[in-house]
Amino acid sequence: MVRQSGVQEKEIVWIGTSYSDFLTFPATAKRDAGYQLHRVQNDLPPENCKIISELGAGVCELRLREDTDIFRVMYVAKFDEAIYVLHCFKKKTQKMTGPDK
């Protein structure tokens, strides 16, 4: 898609099961994540993001809330050609476990 400025919007590439995991999110969390990813596609900063440098250079975490549940979308947007969504999940603890790191 081409933005009004004439610049190409970045493609979103879903890695592994990230898209099917994303589809399990409640409607509000999906809408919020979609809005934030759309901002990133258009070179705008997301509104609720944390850089997770221990996972690699450029990895960001969208933080979404739905009632009492917390959802995360991990992505990398440092490449010109696309935004790579690495992992989508419902947060169950306050710590990241070994496999998620």
Image (cartoon, rainbow, N blue to C red):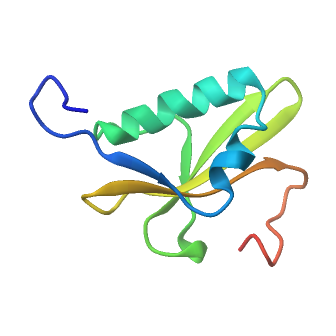
Residue in the foreground of this view, choosing between 35 and 54:
35
Above or below, comparing residue 97 to residue 61 in the picture: below
Residue at 19% across, 31% down? 2
Quadrant of the image for the N terminus? top left
- In the rendered image, which quarter contains the C terminus? bottom right
Residue visible at 76% across and 35% down in the picture: 25
**Residue 72 visible within the image:** no
99, above or below 26, in the image: below
Q: Position of residue 33 (x, y in %)?
A: 58, 34
Whether 65 is drawn above or below 19: the answer is above
On screen, residue 42 versus residue 13, left or right, reads left
Pinpoint residue 46: horizontal percent, then vertical percent: 45, 38
| Rendering coords of residue 42 (x, y %) | 29, 36
Nearer to us in this view, 61 or 16: 16
70 or 19: nearer the viewer = 19
Q: Where residue 27 sits in the image (x, y, percent)?
A: 72, 22
Query: Residue shown at 69%/42% (left/top)?
Result: 22
